[in-house]
Image: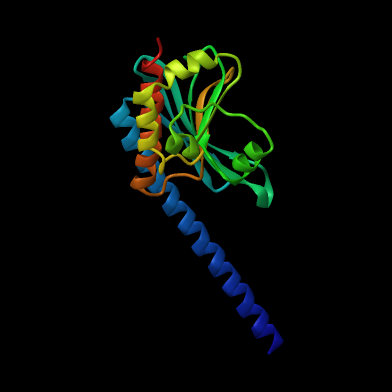
Amino acid sequence: MEILALVGFFALLIGIIVLSVRFVKKQNKKKIELFQQWGLRLNLHHENKKQLLAKLNTLSGELDGKPVVIYEHIVGSGKNQVLYTTVTFAPNPFDFDFKIGKEGFFTKVGKSFGAKDIEFGDEEFDKKFLLKCKDQEDRFRSLMDFRMQGALTNIEKQLKGNISSTNAGFTYSLVGGFNKQTKLEEFEKVMTFMRDLIKNQR
């Protein structure tokens, strides 16, 4: 009886593993197709590489004449692994550092203790977004003019992380990958804002 129970347990375990592998393969295939179609539409080169069971996708080329890479990467190890999807314009079209994100609980707490961000005198806008710039505040204010403030407000729901300008590039990262067209479209709306911001330089 114990042997039968043990055999049944291992059979169930193997079944779960097989189903899990099949599910991951199906998700990988779906994601590759999404990236391939996206690459064709943006005229970017697509490739993918295998990392354990995951297929990590990369799109590379130029958008509006600026070199760009859109790629999936895994941060951490073991149970702490997290998949990110990142777009990077590099070399950075901007020659100064800044960050654009949404206000959250911790940023609001930081403000109450005197942490400063850039505000534009629009109470609703300033409540929603956290904007920082190290050395070129006047240039950043000029860059984030009324039109770009409106464009940022339009992507409030789609903005899931920070848009950053650093020595490494002009970057935006999202936790997770794309298994649905809607998630890809949300990410691309943020990319469109970034492209418009690049064009808005004076």
* Residue 5 place in picture, x, y as percent: 65, 83
Judged left or right of residue 138, residue 80 is right
Judged left or right of residue 120, residue 182 is left
Quadrant housing the N terminus: bottom right
- Residue sitting nearer the eye, 154 or 11: 154
Judged left or right of residue 84, residue 79 is right
Q: Which residue is pictured at 35% across the width and 30% down the height?
A: 151
In the displayed orientation, state which residue is furthest to the top.
202
Q: From where the camera sits, is residue 184 visible?
A: yes
In the displayed orientation, state which residue is furthest to the bottom.
1
Q: Which residue is pictured at 47% across the width and 44% down the height?
A: 177
Quadrant housing the C terminus: top left
Dividing the picture into quadrants, the one containing residue 106 is: top right
Dividing the picture into quadrants, the one containing residue 137 is: top right
- Residue sitting nearer the eye, 115 or 9: 115
* Residue 129 place in picture, x, y as percent: 49, 36
- Residue sitting nearer the eye, 101 or 6: 101
* Residue 107 place in picture, x, y as percent: 61, 39
- Residue sitting nearer the eye, 104 or 71: 104
Q: How many numbered circles does the render carry?
A: 0
Q: Which residue is pictured at 53% across the width and 40% down the height?
A: 103
Q: Which residue is pictured at 61% across the width and 79% down the height?
A: 8
